[in-house]
Amino acid sequence: MAGRRETYLALICVLWLKVSLAVKVGHVLIQSEFCQTQLPSAEFAFQFDDDEIFNVDFEKKLTRWRLPQFGQLASFEAAGALQNKAVDYQNLQVDMKRTNFTAAKPVTPTIYTYTEEPVVLNEPNTVICLVKNIFPPVIKMSWLKNNQPVTDGMAETDFYISSDFSYYKFTYLATMPAKGDVYTCAVEHSGLPGGSTNKPWRPEVPSHIPETSENVVCGLGLAVGIIGIIVGICLIVKGLKNSNSRGH
């Protein structure tokens, strides 16, 4: 079974909802956990309104808080997640046998590339690759710069779960975009045609109005303002004359 490429997945997702008037959801707290036959073999995490609070590092057997401040406001023992993982794995074995080892059906993910900040050529920035609608949660994401693999400055998140129980994931590349650069997010997933695809991103600097055009626009604005002032003064004087004529 170790040589098979199919993914057998057990997924548990608990939603804690704060509901107003039984129809409007104020906030959503999600506890998600899964185990599967491919890597990552398991994950356990808490999210609040689509923001991760913490996840559990099963290898190091510790809780990893998304921000250090979160760990000062709450606590979670990683041992509880390890116990859940053991139960999930047992359930996975049972479910695999009951379904005659029917693999999880893959879904085609969607890929987006963009930057953290507005692009300024040759200035530090971060190129972001977001892959949504991931199922099963087995994916490989990497970066190419001008068709060459690059790892320096790269970072990757864990899997985050969406409201439809699919997953999404980010990978980041800290770089300094230059004119002519092409950054490519290479994605491998069983739901993609052929199992892989590339999503390119090119630096696009917002076009600026030429200085001569700016001067023309400024001059026109100033002229219109002066004409408006003159017209206003003429109307005031005319109004005063009409008032004086009626008075006599």
Image (cartoon, rainbow, N blue to C red):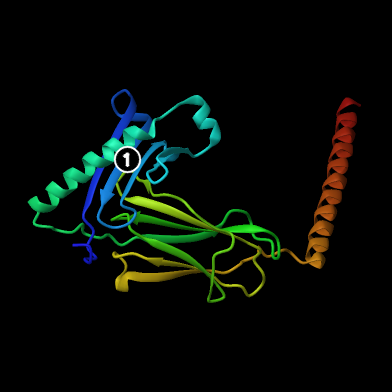
**Where is residue 216 shown, x and y percent of the image?**
81, 63
**Where is residue 210 shown, x and y percent of the image?**
77, 67
Can residue 53 be spotted in the picture? no
Residue furthest out toward the front:
60
Q: Secondary structure at mark 1?
A: strand
Disc 1 residue type (three-letter): Ser
Q: Quadrant of residue 234?
A: top right
Question: Which residue corresponds to the image point at 46% horizontal and 54% vertical from the top-left?
Answer: 170
**Where is residue 14 shown, x and y percent of the image?**
28, 35
Q: Quadrant of the C terminus?
A: top right
The residue lying toward the viewer, choosing from 170 and 37, is: 37
In screen coordinates, is 215 left or right of 123?
A: right
Question: Which residue corresponds to the image point at 43% horizontal and 63% vertical from the top-left?
Answer: 141
Count the marks: how many?
Answer: 1
Q: Is residue 205 above or below residue 67?
A: below
Q: Which residue is mark 1?
A: 32
The residue lying toward the viewer, choosing from 215 and 137, is: 137
In screen coordinates, is 9 left or right of 213?
A: left
Question: Which residue corresponds to the image point at 43% horizontal and 38% vertical from the top-left?
Answer: 62
Q: Quadrant of the N terminus?
A: bottom left
In screen coordinates, is 221 left or right of 168?
A: right
In screen coordinates, is 199 left or right of 133?
A: right
The residue lying toward the viewer, choosing from 58 and 171, is: 58
Q: Quadrant of residue 68?
A: top right
**Where is residue 190 shown, x and y percent of the image?**
29, 65
Question: Which residue corresponds to the image point at 17% horizontal and 43% vertical from the top-left?
Answer: 91
